[in-house]
Amino acid sequence: MSVFGVLTGGGDCPGLNAAIRAIVRGLDARGHEAVGIRTGWRGLVVPDVMPLTRRSVGGILPRGGTVLSTTGFDPFREEGGLDALLATTEKLGLQGVIAIGGEGTLGVAHRLHEQHAYHVVGVPKTIDNDLGGTDVTIGFDTAVHVCTEAIDRLHTTAESHQRVMVVEVMGRNTGWIAVASGVAGGADVILVPELPTPIEDAADHVLARNREGKTFSIVVVAEGYPLTRRSGEQAGPVLQGEDVYGYARLGGIGQVVADEITRMTGFETRVSVLGHVQRGGTPTSRDRFVATQLGLRAVELANEGVWGRMVGIHGNQVVDSSLAAATAERRAVPEELLEAIRLVA
Ligand code: F6P
């Protein structure tokens, strides 16, 4: 019998509880114990931990958020953070930690493993779907589902009022949510950071639709889209501020795009910023399923003492890759996909 820690770090998303449940039950089935580390890596510094048992995780599967709470706390950026984290790990007798997180949380996991031979396995989560080493991250499917439903709803009101509806979705510096929900919701224009369509082309598309008798349009814009002009002139992404470590917080491009479209077409526009609604509420069945598969695979690795890896999904297979490779660079929407979706807009 060994004791393993489980934590969730960074932004929350639907499906985290499904992963926690799978990990706790997977460990239990192998005769191990689980300790819940609260508030991400911070919980190993403070410390802030709670017991997790097969029984106590009953009923959390369909719940959004995380029963462990979460923060983006980075022990490498906090005075005495690293030493405290290592000391708590030892004091609790943890054989290893299963860290469920995105770029930041798994970046810490990678550094801990590389620099301190820390026993850690990563599980990828983020609504942004931008991690390497996996085709899909926990939370993405639910976010896409929420956005698609919003686009469907906006269609009916756009049509009634003959307006252009601009929908701003999250995704940080990638356009996965915009592309997936825009395609699923039949958006007329999809603006993403990876291949930024000039705003004049977007306005022309709206005008062309109008000439064909379509007196409304839906424009989906990813929060990371930089306003781009045909001249090649490009503004930076619109920022709301920064987080405690100085990382940019994006938001506000929807209004900028709407103003430009009104100016260029003369049509009435309205903006909907979906915001944290995309991260809240009950996970889709797909997110619950993926979270369970990934959680169970993480337990297998921990049980075998295979550290410094991140579990993932490739095709229909559950795989694992090094944390180094998985966190090396942000996974952008591929160009061929962006080219292909132009054909259906
Ligand atoms: O990474 C997930 C995400 O929801 C991004 O899409 C978004 O830019 C950011 O987190 C928002 O962060 P916060 O919850 O700190 O406002």
Image: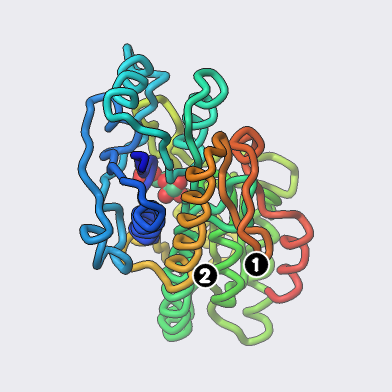
Amino acid type of disc 2? Answer: Phe
Can residue 181 be seen in this snapshot? yes
Residue 101 point in image, percent of width and height:
44, 44
For residue 265, above or below residue 193: below
Q: Is residue 99 left or right of residue 227?
A: left
Q: Is residue 143 left or right of residue 21?
A: right
| Residue at screen point 47% across, 68% down | 289
Q: Which residue is mark 1?
A: 316
Q: CA distance from mark 1 to mark 2?
A: 45 Å
Q: Nearer the viewer, residue 187 or 230?
A: 187
* Neighbours of disc 1 within 10 Å: few (<14), some (14-19), many (20+): few
* Residue 308, position as x, y percentages in the image: 56, 34
Q: Percent from the top left, x then y, of residue 28?
A: 34, 54
Q: Residue at x 23, y 25 (%)?
A: 46
Per the image, the residue denoted by label 2 is 267
Q: On screen, 120 above or below 18?
A: above
Q: Position of residue 227 (x, y in %)?
A: 59, 46
* Secondary element at image label 1: loop
Q: Are marks 1 and 2 in contact (CB under 8 Å)?
A: no
Q: Residue at x 63, y 53 (%)?
A: 319
Among the two numbered marks 1 and 2 on one chain, the one whose residue lies closer to the N terminus? 2
**Residue at (46% x, 55% y) in the render:** 295
